[in-house]
Amino acid sequence: MIDDLSREIRLFTENFTKIEFDADVKSSFLAHLVYCHGLLVSQAPKESIPVLTIG
C-alpha cells in the first residue's frame, strides 16, 4: 500500500501542470499526500497494512 501511495504521488507530481484544477488546491493536496506518506513510513509498524481513504 505504501508503494501504491508513492506511485500516486510520483504520478501526481509528474502530471501536476496537466491537471486542470486550481493550482493552490493541487499544491495543498500534494503537500498533504507527501506528509501522510512520510508519517506512514516513519510511524506505521512494518507489518501493518494501511487502509487509505478519502474523507
Image: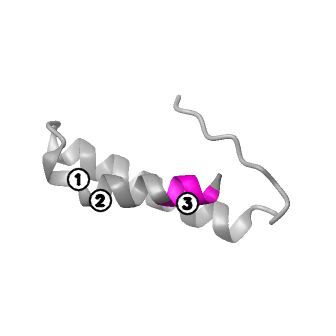
Q: Position of residue 32 (x, y in %)?
A: 43, 52
Name the amino acid, label 3: His
Position of residue 19 in the picture relative to residue 44 (left or right): left
Circle 2 sits on which residue?
13
Cα gap from disc 2 to disc 1, whole angstroms: 5 Å
- In the image, farthest residue toward the bottom: 42
Which residue is pictured at 14% across the width and 37% down the height?
A: 20
Amino acid on which disc 1 is placed: Asn
Instruction: Examine the structure image and report whether residue 8 is included in the region drawn in magenta.
Output: no
Determine the residue positioned at 23% across, 53% down.
Answer: 15
Relative placement, left or right, of 46 versus 32 is right
Instruction: Look at 29% across and 59% down and name the residue there.
Output: 13
Callouts 2 and 1 close, C-beta under 8 Å: yes
Query: Taken as a whole, is the magenta stretch helix, strand or loop?
Result: helix
2 vs 3, front mark: 2
Q: Amino acid at mark 2?
A: Thr
Give the mark, 3 or 1, whose residue is nearer the N terminus: 1
* Residue 5 shown left or right of residue 31 in the figure: right
**Among the 4 quarters of the image, the one containing residue 9:** bottom left
Q: Position of residue 42 (x, y in %)?
A: 67, 71
In the image, residue 24 sits, relative to residue 34, either above or below, namely: above
Q: In the image shown, does 50 or 18 lie closer to the viewer? A: 18
Q: Which residues are magenta?
A: 2-6
Instruction: Check disc 1 and report the residue beneath it.
Output: 15
Please name the residue that numbered disc 3 is placed on: 37
Q: Secondary structure beneath disc 2? A: helix
Disc 3, SS: helix
Mark 2 / mark 3, whichever is N-terminal: 2
